[in-house]
Image (spheres, grey):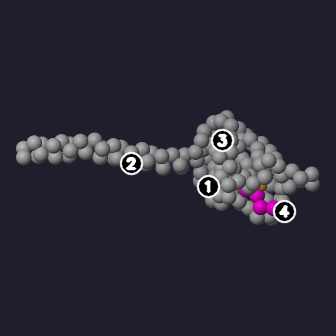
Amino acid sequence: MKKLFLSAALAVLAGTPVLAGVSGHGDGHGAHSSHGEQMAAGVPGKLSEVSRTVKVAMEETDDGDMIFTPSAMEFKQGETIRIMVVNEGELDHEFVLDTPERNAMHKQAMAGGMEQHNTPNAVTLAPGKRGEVIWNFSNGGTFEFACLIPGHYESGMYGQVTVQ
Ligand SMILES: [Cu+2]
């Protein structure tokens, strides 16, 4: 009888570290979700903090390419930029600002049939439409803007963002 009680008590004790492990996992998850707001390329910017506006046009060319104009951008670290995106083409296009690695992953997901979703670092536009991305380039580095609609990146729809 005494032995049985003891082993039950041990089982309860043995359960304690498992519970601690679960709550530890919960903390890790919280850190992961706050990671989503701060991206390598920076953070969503506030309109009131915009220091300048840059226009980016998206279109198809006569020889079958698809391009961004300009095809490269340079900012200073800490600047908040209003990127005015205009679709001057005849097809839907999107502007996605991210690291080249994350754009490549996103492109693969879209090739697999994933719908594009609206996030602060991206805008999808029908022909003739304009939209904007307001972004605070809080981190230095080399980033990328791209159209990840299947086939468009391969046709030339990407450019480099340098943040110094
Ligand atoms: Cu496109």
Q: Could you tell me which secondary element the residue under label 1 belongs to?
A: loop
Residue 51, given in percent of the width and then of the height, sits at: 66, 48
Residue 64 as seen in the image, left or right of residue 11:
right
Disc 4 and disc 1: Cα gap in Å?
24 Å
The type of residue carrying mark 1 is Pro
Answer few, some or many: residues within 10 Å of disc 4's Cα (few below 14, many 20 plus, some between 14 and 19).
few
Q: Mark on residue 90?
A: 4
Q: Quarter of the image containing the C terminus?
A: top right
Disc 1 and disc 2: Cα gap in Å?
26 Å
Q: Could you tell me which secondary element the residue under label 2 belongs to?
A: helix
The type of residue carrying mark 4 is Glu
The type of residue carrying mark 2 is Gly
Disc 4 and disc 2: Cα gap in Å?
47 Å
Mark 1, residue position: 120
Sequence order check, earlier mark of 1 and 3: 3
Magenta stretch, main secondary structure class: loop
Q: Which residues are magenta?
A: 90-94
Taking the spot 71% from the left edge, 59% from the top edge, the residue there is 124
Taking the spot 74% from the left edge, 61% from the top edge, the residue there is 125
Sequence order check, earlier mark of 1 and 2: 2
Disc 4 and disc 3: Cα gap in Å?
28 Å
Residue 28 as seen in the image, left or right of residue 121:
left
Q: Could you tell me which secondary element the residue under label 3 belongs to?
A: helix
Mark 3, residue position: 101
Q: Mark on residue 3?
A: none
- Label 4 CB less than 8 angstroms from ligand 1: no
Specify whether residue 54 is in view: no
Mark 2, residue position: 26
Asked if labels 2 and 4 touch by Cβ distance under 8 angstroms, the answer is no
Choose mark 4 or mark 1, whichever is in front: 4
